[in-house]
Image (tube, helix red, strand yellow):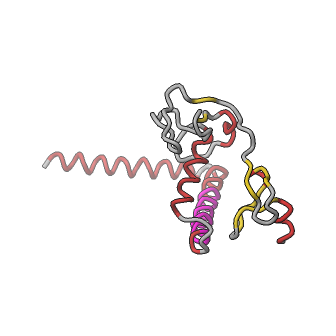
Amino acid sequence: MSYLKHLFDNDHKQRNDIDMMRADLESMPDVWNTIQRMNTRLGRLELLCETLMEVIVVKNLASEAEISVLMQQIDLEDGVEDGAHHAEVRGAAPRCRQCDKFINPARSNCVYCDAPIKGAAIKRRPPPKLVHCVGCAQSVPESSTYFTANGLRCESCFAAMQ
């Protein structure tokens, strides 16, 4: 039964450490207020993301699977599949030699085309991907289109919808 005493002692010590850290933070009102504001903003952002996901899926703009794939693609833009987006290194991320998508060099195969990655990673900017506007049927760079419920529209067609 002596092991229980040590178990409770450890629990008591951890709680005491937490209380001391909280007291230290509360004694620094600027830091404490910043943490509280960030926590509030984080909660709002989580709510916003969940709301947007629900709207996108309910209105059949995209499925959860499509959103998941797109999230993985955006995650890989920095060359690291870590569940976070680091836009500052976006252009330097390695790409697959086969399909030119962003890859995780730690993987053995590309998650898009299944091509072997070993020695296949290149760091270059591809030419802009051209897509067809559903409004005017012109080929336009994908980066200058807007996703609508009826498909991709170029800047001119999208502006005319507004």
Does the magenta portion include 45?
yes
How many numbered discs, if any? 0
59 within the magenta span: no
Q: Residue at x 69, y 31 (%)?
A: 124
Nearer the observer, 42 or 83: 83
When the figure is inspected, residue 147 is found, relative to residue 9, above or below; the finding is: below
Quadrant for the C terminus, please. bottom right
Instruction: Please provide percent x and percent y for residue 99.
Output: 59, 40
Question: Is 123 left, or right, of 16 in this rendering?
Answer: right
Report whether 14 appears left or right of 139: left
- Residue 40 image point, x, y percent: 61, 62
The magenta stretch is 37-56
| Up/down of 5 relative to 152, above or below | above
Q: Position of residue 60 (x, y in %)?
A: 59, 71
Main SS class of the magenta portion in the image: helix
**Residue at the extreme bottom of the image, as rendered:** 58
Left or right, 125 with reference to 140: left
Instruction: Name which quarter of the figure residue 80 lies in.
Output: top right
